[in-house]
Image (cartoon, rainbow, N blue to C red):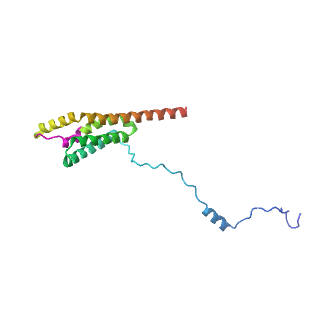
Amino acid sequence: MAPGGPARSTRPGPQRRPRSEQAAAAVRRPLPTPAPQPVSRFPNPRLTGLGSGLFCGAVMLLLGYLDSLLFDSLALYSVLFLPVCALTALWVRDGDLLTAPVVVPIAFAVGLLPVAADGGGISGHLMGLVTGLATEAGWLYGGTLIAGLLVIARRVRLVARRAAARRRQG
């Protein structure tokens, strides 16, 4: 034993840095980066049943007015109806899925009001609306079918997710 203190090892130990260097080293260490969140390219709103009806009706009415001002074509109006149906079915929230196939034909009829041929007076306008519904029935059924198929697919996926969550818990 050496005089004046305990025996020292000849093995080199960790060197101590002054506190200021330790603080600087801590500052220089990069912080862990959070996991990147998936980037959504499309908006993903969740509309209530009433909100989806208002959305679909307002968009179809706007498209009807634009079509009557610019093109006056029932065919163009009907083709534009299909993406509106798809968006309505995709954006309605899970609890209100069954409203989408109901509101899209109503919205088609609402938007058809400015596009329908006007024969003069209320009866002429009503006759133009009925004629427009009759001549564009294929597009109306197609849009309703698109909304229905998307709603069914979303509902099947929702039920499968709930069943998987129940299996994991119990």
Q: Which residues are magenta?
A: 109-119
Q: Position of residue 137 (x, y in %)?
A: 24, 34
Residue 75 is left or right of residue 92, and the answer is left
Which of the two residues, 97 or 37, is positioned nearer the viewer here? Answer: 37
The quadrant where residue 17 appears: bottom right
Q: Position of residue 126 (x, y in %)?
A: 15, 37
Q: Is residue 23 left or right of residue 67?
A: right
Give the camera-side residue of 20 and 122.
122
- Provide residue 102's location: percent of width, then percent of height: 30, 34
Q: Residue at x 20, y 49 (%)?
A: 70
- The residue drawn where x is 22% and y is 48% is 66
Is residue 9 in the magenta section? no
- Quarter holding the C terminus? top right
The image quadrant of residue 108 is: top left
Seen in the picture, residue 54 relative to 141 is either above or below; the reply is below
Q: Can I make out residue 99 in this image?
A: no
Q: Which quadrant would the N terminus be assigned to in this image?
A: bottom right
